[in-house]
Image (cartoon, helix red, strand yellow):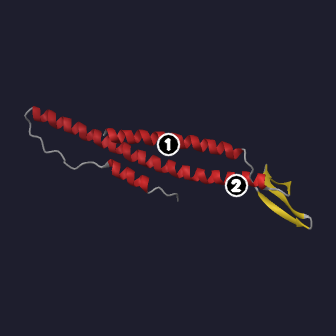
Amino acid sequence: MIVIREIVDVLIKEELRNKNLKKQYENEIANLPKGCFSANVLKSGTFYTFHYRENGKNKSKYIGRDKSAMQAQIDRRKHLLEEIQFIEYDLKALGKMKKIAEKQISNLDVRERLRKMRVAKSEDGEEVPPASTSPIHATSSISTQLSNRTPT
């Protein structure tokens, strides 16, 4: 039972870590540009314009010949959005695993109370039915869910 409670503690810590990481990513995304480029090819070279929406209106910003700095910011934004999707998937899986582990803890608590009642009854001289001998393998279901971690 101690092992399962330690697993729940680890799940809670991981859940908090993921929530904090998600907030960091969302704050960073808020400061990054959202939009796309268009290229104008002229005899003198290629010139770029950045298109985005602001207050529900389409806006354009002339970038010039070098779009690499802004492109890096847009790529960073896309990467962070993908990471947030993975974090949300992990949070959902962690919630399910935490629920399973907590249910196993409550089942173990009930079994422990029943065992104590049987011991108390047997000391009083009453006939007690034999206890179930099947072990509970809560950690196997949790580790199975951890190993099957793939985003949908």
For marks 1 and 2, give the CA distance: 27 Å
Residue at image location 39% in from the left, 54% down from the top: 144
Of residues 123 and 18, the one nearer the viewer is 18
Of residues 7 and 44, the one nearer the viewer is 44
Q: Position of residue 16 (x, y in %)?
A: 51, 39
* Label 2 neighbour load within 10 Å: few <14, some 14-19, many 20+: some
Residue at image location 82% in from the left, 56% down from the top: 66
Of residues 114 and 64, the one nearer the viewer is 64
Question: Mark 2 belongs to which amino acid?
Answer: Asp
Question: Mark 1 belongs to which amino acid?
Answer: Glu
Q: Position of residue 49 (x, y in %)?
A: 84, 58
- The image quadrant of residue 39 is bottom right
Residue at image location 30% in from the left, 43% down from the top: 107
- The image quadrant of residue 63 is bottom right
Residue 23, compared with residue 45, is above or below; it is above
Residue 58, compared with residue 110, is above or below; it is below
Q: Secondary structure at mark 1?
A: helix
Left or right: where 8 falls relative to 28: left
Quickly name the residue at label 1. Answer: 15
User: Which residue is the extreme one toward the left?
Assistant: 125
Q: Earlier in the sequence, mark 1 or mark 2?
A: 1
* Label 1 neighbour load within 10 Å: few <14, some 14-19, many 20+: many
Q: Are marks 1 and 2 in contact (CB under 8 Å)?
A: no
Q: Position of residue 21 (x, y in %)?
A: 58, 43
Of residues 68 and 106, the one nearer the viewer is 68
Give residue 75's mark: 2
> Where the N terminus falls, by quadrant?
top left
Residue at image location 57% in from the left, 40% down from the top: 20
Q: Position of residue 24 (x, y in %)?
A: 62, 42
Q: Secondary structure at mark 2?
A: helix
Q: Nearer the viewer, mark 1 or mark 2?
A: 2
Counting labels gives 2
